[in-house]
């Protein structure tokens, strides 16, 4: 339980002389050449489709011209970044992105923990399994279907409007109401993902040493005391890992979902950095400008990831590397 | 002592009542929207448009589904999605397993640097436009390959597979096989793979459902509508409110009838599109739980 998810394991250095080590290393590589053959296709796939775009993002500093290519187009420096920072869109996009992300983070962090502890505590095992199965199910619904469900409920003929008209409120086009957009995005996300995160916490709860519960029982601890002193510390490492991931990806809101929920009426509150990147890049064909905004997004995300990871390591010994 | 025990059990009882009520509430919140969608999809067009349907079909019909079966775009999307799902899952699986296996071997020099190469792609993204331009320049744009190759490897899945190999295949097995003169590829195909059925099941499900549910790659990489997967067809019908093929053909019908039928069909389409995953879900959910467990223990 010292470290939950360690992606990179440090290999021990043997302390042998470098020349000897080099020769031995070569022998080892030669002996296991088939392993390199096996990894080659996936490595190529990653290098071509992940690293070449990283190389290609230099068009953010150039006036991209398809005939001249990534590296041949004319250098314009930080012109497109300046355009973006000076545009009236900039603060709107950044604020929308941050607001939606933080709102979602606050909503999605506690609910699955409560759900997992409740599932863990109930004495009816079959009931617990059933609730777990059904609350996990929405996770497998596609984004398009999820957004369609929201649309159908909010449509003038939908469930919500009918319920509202029962209590005497007039039917309205709820999807066109910008004030509702952020809450709709967040709570439909919670509806879809709470069960998924609960399963992760349940796995962590199952890993807690049962002797702790026995000791607590002998000491006469109440259920609340057990939850606070055993369950919560037990799922803390998992909580921190999820928090790191969600914080690091804070600029990468689920733009694929937002893109589907977006319309002219809610654009002011729904437009986030990456939906703008999509529109500028693929609809307005502003390749360089769009790449500059994308690069801005990627760099901030990377810095956030590293900082959050460092902080987590410092305060809790849990990190990705 | 006795008194204390009794108060505890009263606390316990209250806790369990509150706890189970909370769980029933969670169940209701999850199920009611789904029940409503399914009930609407089996109701008559008139009941749907007048908002009479709650959690049971009203005047049950199959009208919505019969219209779907006659809709050319939807069926084509369905077929396309199946093709992308089968081909894509196969290629993703092969790439992930062959990529994860060497990195799980202790004798594999360069493990650390390769792990970094893979990990870095999770931290830094080259961007939408450079990827799009790359796919175009490779002449993959608007072909089936664009749907399968560029995002074939999900690095997280590769690390899950590696963690599985490391934890469930003992080092001694490799050493013994090497002494018997097995090559590394032979060890992989005849020893590691047969022992890896659980992780293969997990990966197949992760990839298959990921591909089935994805609309964005198709939005970016495809332009001909006869290649669109189901999710993109759905987006056009349900969200962009493009007309269904049967409506384009029959303009003679009266307006309110068409409106009612369209609303009904939207519900039927939602159910239809989720059907493959939802039918399999009760059987496969334990594999997903397993996959999450493998991913969350120390790799």
Image: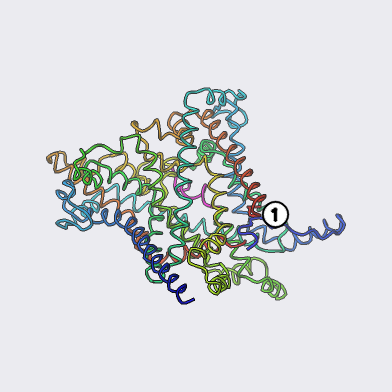
Q: Which residues are magenta?
A: B142-154
Left or right position of A72 against B131? right
**B179 and B241: which is toward the camera:** B241
Tell me residue A269's x, y (percent).
40, 33
Tell me residue B255's x, y (percent).
14, 39
Residue at numbered disc 1: B112
Tell me residue B10's x, y (percent).
40, 69
Residue at left offset 43%, top offset 33%: A271
Q: Secondary structure at mark 1?
A: helix
**A173 and A220: which is toward the camera:** A220
Q: Say above or below: B80 vs A66.
A: below
Most common SS among magenta residues: loop
Left or right position of A193 against A31? left
| Quadrant where the C terminus of chain B is found in the figure | bottom right
Left or right position of B191 against A173? right
Would you call the spot at circle 1 few (<14 residues within 10 Å), some (14-19), or many (20 or more)? some
Image color mode: rainbow
| Magenta stretch encompasses residue A221 | no
Tell me residue B109's x, y (percent).
73, 58
Q: Say above or below: B211 vs A134.
A: above
Q: Quadrant location of residue A157? A: top left
Asked whether residue A249 is in view, the answer is: yes
**B65 and A7: which is toward the camera:** A7
Asked whether residue B233 is in view, the answer is: no
């Amino acid at each position: 339980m010292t470290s939950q998810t360690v992606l990179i394991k440090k290999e021990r250095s043997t302390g042998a002389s470098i020349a000897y080590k080099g020769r031995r290393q070569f022998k080892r590589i030669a002996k296991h050449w088939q392993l390199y053959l096996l990894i080659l296709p996936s490595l190529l796939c990653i290098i071509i489709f992940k690293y070449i775009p990283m190389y290609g993002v230099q068009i953010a500093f150039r006036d991209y011209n398809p005939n001249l290519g990534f590296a041949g187009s004319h250098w314009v420096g930080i012109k497109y970044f300046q355009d973006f920072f000076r545009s009236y869109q900039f603060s709107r996009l950044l604020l929308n992105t941050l607001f939606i992300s933080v709102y979602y983070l606050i909503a999605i962090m506690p609910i699955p923990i409560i759900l997992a502890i409740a599932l863990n505590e109930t004495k009816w095992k079959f009931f617990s399994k059933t609730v777990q199965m059904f609350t996990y199910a929405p996770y497998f619904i596609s984004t398009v279907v999820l957004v369609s469900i929201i649309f159908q409920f909010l449509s003038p003929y939908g469930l919500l409007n009918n319920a509202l008209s029962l209590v005497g409120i007039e039917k309205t086009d709820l999807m066109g109401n910008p004030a509702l957009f952020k809450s709709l995005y967040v709570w439909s996300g919670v509806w879809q993902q709470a069960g998924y995160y609960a399963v992760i916490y349940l796995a962590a709860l199952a890993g807690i040493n049962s002797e702790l519960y026995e000791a607590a029982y002998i000491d006469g601890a109440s259920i609340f005391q057990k939850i606070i002193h055993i369950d919560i510390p037990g799922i803390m490492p998992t909580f921190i890992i999820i928090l790191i991931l969600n914080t690091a990806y804070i600029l990468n809101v689920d733009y694929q979902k937002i893109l589907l929920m977006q319309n002219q009426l809610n654009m002011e509150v729904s437009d986030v950095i990456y939906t703008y990147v999509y529109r500028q890049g693929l609809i307005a064909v502003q390749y360089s400008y769009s790449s500059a905004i994308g690069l801005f997004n990627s760099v901030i995300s990377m810095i956030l990831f590293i900082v959050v990871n460092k902080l987590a390591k410092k305060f809790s010994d849990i990190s990705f590397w | 002592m006795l008194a204390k025990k009794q108060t505890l059990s009263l606390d316990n009882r209250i806790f369990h009542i509150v706890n189970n009520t909370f769980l029933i509430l969670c169940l209701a919140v999850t199920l009611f929207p789904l029940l409503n969608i399914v009930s609407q999809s089996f109701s008559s067009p008139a009941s749907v448009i007048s908002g009479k349907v709650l959690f049971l079909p009203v005047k049950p019909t199959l009208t919505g589904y019969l219209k779907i079966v006659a809709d050319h775009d939807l069926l084509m999307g369905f077929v396309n999605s199946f093709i992308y799902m089968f081909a894509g899952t196969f290629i993703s699986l092969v790439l992930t397993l062959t990529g994860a296996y060497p990195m799980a071997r202790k004798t594999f020099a360069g493990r650390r640097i390769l792990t970094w190469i893979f990990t870095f792609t999770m931290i830094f993204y080259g961007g939408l436009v450079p990827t799009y331009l790359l796919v175009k320049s490779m002449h993959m744009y608007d072909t089936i390959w664009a749907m399968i190759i560029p995002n074939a490897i999900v690095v997280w899945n590769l690390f899950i597979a590696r963690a599985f190999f490391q934890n469930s295949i003992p080092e001694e097995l490799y050493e013994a096989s090497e002494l018997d003169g097995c090559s590394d590829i032979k060890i992989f195909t005849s020893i590691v793979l047969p022992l890896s059925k659980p992780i293969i099941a997990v990966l197949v499900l992760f990839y298959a459902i990921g591909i089935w549910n994805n609309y964005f790659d198709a939005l970016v990489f495809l332009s001909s509508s006869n290649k669109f997967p189901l999710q993109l067809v759905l987006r056009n019908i349900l969200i962009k409110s493009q007309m269904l093929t049967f409506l384009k053909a029959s303009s003679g019908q009266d307006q309110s009838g068409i409106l009612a039928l369209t609303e009904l069909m939207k519900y039927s389409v939602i159910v239809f599109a989720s059907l493959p995953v939802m039918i399999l879900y009760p059987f496969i959910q334990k594999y997903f739980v397993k996959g999450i467990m493998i991913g969350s223990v120390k790799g």
